[in-house]
């Protein structure tokens, strides 16, 4: 594609002006070459900044881009933690079927993350919602595995069994269902459905006393 005249003119100014300054300082003013080179380099840097200024919008986009990258990296780490919890639930806890369900959650989480990466533009609020959701999943599954391992101060065996049953029969299936809904929402471009899915699940977990 042919470059526009403004772009060509910028390049001419960017390279010709520092060169002219260099030759004037050396041959007309008799300045040492080293000093003339430094001054010319400064002129080049100043022109580069003036001719290619970053707008506040561009700067804001760069900041958001870094934040999105950080959120996605944290999301990937949470998925790895969920997979690790599945391993603990399977061995030594001996709950193979539940471990498979937890691995399914990790697979669905990865699928949702990949859908975000496939989008032309990734919005920070949406990524933050997904990360927060996976943080919620990780916290509850970690607590669940601690209960199975007997590392929590639960008062009675009945209370322990009630919590285990609640996580296995309600929470884990609801996690998977919510992730499936998120994937469908992303495929349809309905990002508002993400927050609705999380709010609904969060209320369910609060009602069961699994989160504050």
Image: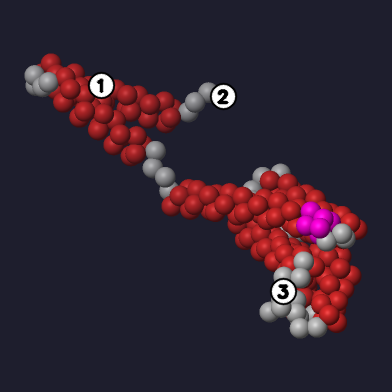
Q: Are marks 2 and 1 in contact (CB under 8 Å)?
A: no
Residue 107: image x %, image y %? Answer: 80, 50
Q: Is residue 59 found left or right of 79 in the rendered image?
A: left
Of the image marks 2 and 1, the number of the one nearer the N terminus: 2
Q: Is residue 96 found left or right of 105 in the rendered image?
A: right
Of the image marks 1 and 3, the number of the one nearer the N terminus: 1
Q: Nearer the viewer, mark 2 or mark 3?
A: 3
Secondary-structure class at tag 2? loop
The residue that disc 3 covers is: 152
**Real-space CA distance between mark 1 and mark 3, rounded to the nearest whole angstrom:** 73 Å
Secondary-structure class at tag 1? helix
Residue in view at x 36 percent, y 37 percent: 51
The residue that disc 1 covers is: 19
**Residue 10: mark:** none
Asked if residue 184 shows in the view, the reply is no
Residue in view at x 65 percent, y 57 percent: 127
User: Front-most of 32 and 98?
Assistant: 98
């Amino acid at each position: 594609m042919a470059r526009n005249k403004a772009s060509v003119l910028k390049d001419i100014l960017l390279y010709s002006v520092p060169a002219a300054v260099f030759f004037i300082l050396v041959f007309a003013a008799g300045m040492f070459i080293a000093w003339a080179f430094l001054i010319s380099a400064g002129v080049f840097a100043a022109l580069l900044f003036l001719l290619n200024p970053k707008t506040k919008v561009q700067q804001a986009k760069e900041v958001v881009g870094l934040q999105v990258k950080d959120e996605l990296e944290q999301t990937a780490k949470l998925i790895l933690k969920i997979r690790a919890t599945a391993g603990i639930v399977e061995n030594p806890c001996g709950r193979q079927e539940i471990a498979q369900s937890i691995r399914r959650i990790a697979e669905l989480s990865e699928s949702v993350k990949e859908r975000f990466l496939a989008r032309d533009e990734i919005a920070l609020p949406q990524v933050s919602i997904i990360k927060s959701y996976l943080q919620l999943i990780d916290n509850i599954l970690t607590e669940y595995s601690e209960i199975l391992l007997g590392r929590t101060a639960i008062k009675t065996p009945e209370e322990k069994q009630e919590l285990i049953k609640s996580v296995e029969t309600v929470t884990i299936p609801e996690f998977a269902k919510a992730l499936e809904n998120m994937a469908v929402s992303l495929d349809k471009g309905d990002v508002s459905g993400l927050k609705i899915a999380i709010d609904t699940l969060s209320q369910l977990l609060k009602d069961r006393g699994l989160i504050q």
